[in-house]
Amino acid sequence: MNPQDPESGKDTVHCKEALAEIYLLLDRECSPERDAELRRHIEDCPPCLEAYGIDVVLKELIARKCGGDLAPAQLKQKLRASIHQRVNVSIEHTEVRAENRD
């Protein structure tokens, strides 16, 4: 997705940015303005919406299986850096497939 003019109300976020910040969005660590920008992009971008949905389910599963234990701040920081690095490397190719499951 290409960034667009904010005055027109259209998307201003790149997929790369949205995917790198999904966990900030899920953890409600974004400013209200950034939250709105990311959500607007995710709602309009099928690949990012799919990634967001997968991450929501993954976060819920981890919370359920870990009993609500909180990860140390240092671990969170390392995970964010690792995810950000992987997203920056792997976002170059996005493929969407539709399968008919009968």
Image: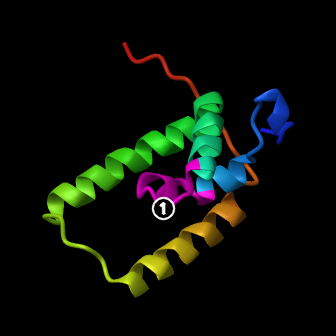
Residue at horizontal 54%, vertical 58%?
30
Quadrant of residue 66 within the rendered picture: bottom left
What scheme was used to colour the molecule? rainbow
Q: Residue furthest right?
A: 5
Residue at horizontal 65%, vertical 29%?
44
Q: Is residue 51 above or below residue 62?
A: above
Q: Position of residue 91 (x, y in %)?
A: 70, 54
The three-letter amino acid code for the residue at tag 1 is: Glu
- Total labels: the figure holds 1
Q: State yes or no: residue 53 in magenta.
A: no
Residue 99 relative to residue 91: left or right: left
**Badge 1, how many Cα within 10 Å: few under 14, some, many 20+?**
few
What residue is pinned by disc 1?
A: 29
Q: Quadrant of the C terminus?
A: top left
Q: State yes or no: residue 23 in magenta.
A: yes
Residue 52 relative to residue 60: left or right: right
Q: Quadrant of the N terminus?
A: top right
Residue at horizontal 23%, vertical 59%?
63
Q: Nearer the viewer, residue 37 or 56?
A: 37
Q: Nearer the viewer, residue 61 or 4?
A: 4
Residue range in magenta is 20-32
Q: Position of residue 81 (x, y in %)?
A: 57, 76
Q: Nearer the viewer, residue 23 or 5?
A: 5
Q: Position of residue 80 (x, y in %)?
A: 52, 72
Q: Position of residue 84 (x, y in %)?
A: 61, 68
Please, what secondary structure does the residue beneath circle 1 have? loop
Q: Is residue 36 above or below residue 25?
A: above
Residue at horizontal 24%, vertical 52%?
61
